[in-house]
């Protein structure tokens, strides 16, 4: 953001954002925008450590509830026992609990590691079993193979059976990034102007054979695979099929299905083969992390609006996800306002432990408690 933009945002926020929630609702009503202060939900993502004592978790959960946060998405590294321990502690502090799972990216999964053939294979023939794209923790399962997808679904079921959990929350429910967020490219010293073979998945023999039977052409022989729409659609459908099956499983256990997804559907499609507006799902939490994409805060409003519009015909709620470590308290305030004004049903913060006292104060000022 340049200095002029900063001044503009600062002056705009001073003019329009002071005051209590009732005044904000009134101002929104005057501007014709829909705001339901009592129904707007505040979430955090947080990652659990089995070695932390209960008292430490109680302190963390209390911090959230005392500042108006109502729901906590807990990553237990897919451990139903740890989740069973933490869910009552969170609920005791008045929080709704969601079971966050890394779905297709399963680094160090001890069951999957016994089956090297379960892993996604790149266009240049490397398996993420032993060749990781971008980072060490990228170890992705193939969504097409019966055994690898059923493994993921069995993990979903294990979390869905935990008492006191409201939803199973799918994360990494996609292919590896064919395009990395533009703001992250310098970090990896990468240039991506086309779909590069080492980041293009999945070319395992099962994916190729199934696609070839359906479409009578072999993606391994395409001159430019990015131009083949059936090949793109095949992969979008494979992720959707895992989600749709997960939906049935969690609903059979009286839970709902939520997911952390890319900012809006076409962008998700372009970057990670993820078309979440077509899924069977109850709520999505798009990670509208403006700083990853070299975008300014107002982009949070744009992306929220786009996703909400794309879900208009469906009974799916959208809660905007924001990345707080690089945001000032003032920017968090703007992000909350942008999410509300553009039709989100809530906002989620990544991550809970990164929230500063100033940011928590802003969240609290929106006045739930
Ligand atoms: Zn495959």
Image: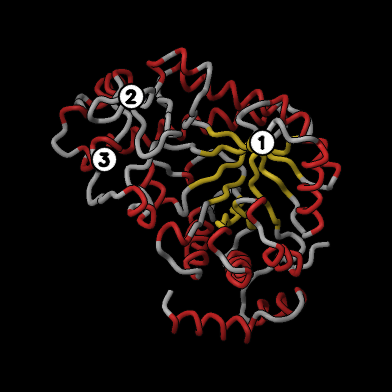
Residues at badges 1 and 2 in contact (C-beta under 8 Å)? no
Ligand 1 quarter of the rendering: top left
Mark 3 neighbour class, 10 Å CA radius: few under 14, some 14 to 19, many 20 or more: few
Foreground mark, 3 or 1, reads 1
From the viewer's side, name the closer residue of 252 and 84.
84
Q: For the residues marked 1 and 2, what is the alpha-carbon distance in whole angstroms? A: 28 Å
Label 2, secondary structure: give it: loop
Residue 73: x %, y % from top left: 66, 43
Label 1 crowd bin: few (<14), some (14–19), many (20+), radius 10 Å: many
- Image point (28%, 49%), residue name: 190
Residue depth check, mark 1 versus mark 2: number of the one nearer the observer: 2
- In the depicted structure, whether residue 16 falls above or below residue 134: below
Q: Secondary structure at mark 3?
A: helix
Query: Which quarter of the rendered picture does the C terminus lie within?
Result: bottom right
Q: Earlier in the sequence, mark 3 or mark 1?
A: 1
Which of the pair 52/151 is nearer the observer?
52
Find the distance from the CA under tag 3 to the CA under tag 2: 24 Å
| Residue 230 numbered mark, or none | none
Q: Are marks 3 and 2 in contact (CB under 8 Å)?
A: no
Color style of the picture: secondary structure
The residue singled out by tag 3 in the image is 229
Q: Secondary structure at mark 1?
A: strand
- Which circle marks residue 127 in the picture? 2
**Residue count near mark 2 (Cα–Cα under 10 Å), binned few <14, some 14–19, many ≥20:** many
Q: Is residue 110 left or right of residue 192?
A: right
Mark earlier in primary sequence (1, 2): 1
Question: On the rendered structure, is 230 left or right of 368?
Answer: left
Residue at 70 percent of width and 56 percent of height: 42
């Amino acid at each position: 953001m340049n200095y002029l933009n900063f001044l503009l945002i600062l002056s705009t926020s001073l003019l329009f954002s002071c005051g209590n929630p009732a005044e904000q609702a009134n101002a929104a009503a005057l501007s014709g925008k829909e705001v339901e202060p009592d129904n707007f939900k505040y979430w955090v993502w947080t990652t659990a450590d089995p070695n932390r004592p209960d008292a430490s978790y109680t302190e963390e959960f209390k911090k959230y509830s005392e500042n108006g946060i109502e729901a906590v998405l807990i990553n237990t590294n897919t451990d139903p026992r740890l989740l069973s321990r933490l869910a009552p502690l969170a609920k005791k502090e008045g929080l709704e609990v969601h079971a966050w799972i890394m779905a297709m990216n399963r680094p160090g999964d001890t069951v999957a590691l016994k089956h090297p053939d379960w892993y996604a294979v790149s266009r240049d023939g490397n398996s993420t079993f032993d060749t990781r794209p971008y980072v060490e923790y990228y170890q992705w399962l193939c969504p097409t193979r019966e055994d690898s997808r059923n493994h993921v679904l069995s993990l979903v079921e294990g979390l869905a059976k935990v008492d006191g959990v409201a939803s199973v929350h799918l994360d990494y429910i996609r292919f590896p990034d064919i395009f990395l967020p533009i703001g992250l490219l310098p970090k990896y010293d990468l240039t991506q102007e086309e779909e590069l073979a080492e980041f293009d998945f999945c070319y395992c023999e099962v994916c190729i054979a199934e696609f070839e039977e359906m479409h009578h052409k072999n993606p391994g022989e395409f001159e430019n695979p990015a131009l083949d729409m059936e090949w793109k659609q095949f992969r979008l459908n494979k992720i959707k099929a895992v989600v749709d099956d997960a939906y049935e499983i969690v609903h059979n256990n009286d839970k709902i299905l939520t997911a952390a997804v890319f900012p809006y559907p076409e962008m998700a499609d372009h970057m990670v083969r993820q078309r979440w507006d077509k899924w069977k799902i109850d709520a999505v939490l798009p990670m509208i992390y403006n700083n990853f994409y070299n975008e300014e805060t107002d982009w949070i409003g744009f992306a929220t609006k786009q996703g909400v519009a794309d879900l208009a015909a469906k009974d799916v709620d959208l809660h905007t996800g924001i990345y707080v470590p690089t945001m000032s308290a003032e920017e968090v305030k703007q992000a909350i306002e942008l999410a509300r004004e553009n039709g989100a049903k809530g906002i989620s913060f990544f991550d809970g432990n990164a929230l500063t006292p100033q940011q928590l104060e802003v969240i609290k000022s929106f006045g739930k408690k």
